[in-house]
Image (spheres, grey):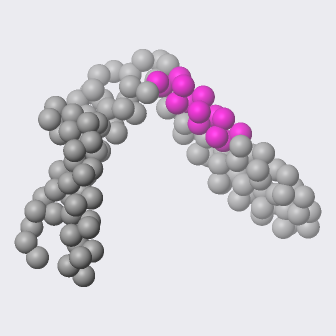
Amino acid sequence: MKKITDLIRNGIVKISKIEFVRNSIDEHADLSAFKEKPSLLVIAGVTAIGVSFLIGWPAVAALGALSIHLHKPMIVVIGGPLTYGLSHLVFMFGMYLSGGTYTLIFCRWLTRICVENLLVWSSRET
């Protein structure tokens, strides 16, 4: 068990040395950019991302239920992948509209929080 824990701790130390991770920790990445009022494009992008979640699995599940109810399996066999593919296209369009700025800010903050907590955990004596 000690050997596995040591491997995990070494992995955490290696991750903490990655430049993106180091910069996130050194610059104390936070979510303060989310306090600013978002532009219309960002709002449209986030809305499209939300719609993509509704188009995804809930729509596929509804097609599955409809297919069972009507005893027509081809509804879900053909419609399921098409609907799910459409949800991915809508999601990517939403990401394009909202831009990568907020995504990068969120990822930097999440990276900092996770790695700092992992470093605290790995430095504890067992």
List x then y, in percent, for residue 105.
32, 32
Residue range corresponding to the magenta coloring: 86-99
Relative side of 54 to 117, left or right? right
Confirm whether the magenta stretch covers residue 103: no
Relative side of 8 to 120, left or right? right
Q: Nearer the viewer, residue 64 or 15?
A: 15
List x then y, in percent, for residue 94.
56, 30
Give the total number of marks visible in the rendering.
Answer: 0
List x then y, in percent, for residue 28.
16, 36
Q: Return the residue found at the far left.
A: 125
Q: Nearer the viewer, residue 116 or 76?
A: 116
Residue at (65%, 54%) from the top-left corner? Answer: 57
Relative side of 109 to 45, left or right? left
Q: Is residue 122 visible?
A: yes
Residue at (21%, 34%) from the top-left corner? Answer: 23
Q: Is residue 30 visible?
A: no
Q: Relative to 12, does residue 6 appear above or below in the rendering?
A: below
Looking at the figure, which quarter contains the N terminus? Answer: bottom left
Q: Return the residue found at the far bottom.
A: 1
Q: Relative to 64, does residue 36 appear above or below in the rendering?
A: above
Residue 33 in which image quadrant: top left
Secondary structure mainly formed by the magenta segment: helix
Confirm whether the magenta stretch covers residue 96: yes
Relative side of 90 to 26, left or right? right
Residue 70 in which image quadrant: bottom right
Residue at (20%, 79%) from the top-left corner? Answer: 2
List x then y, in percent, for residue 107.
34, 39
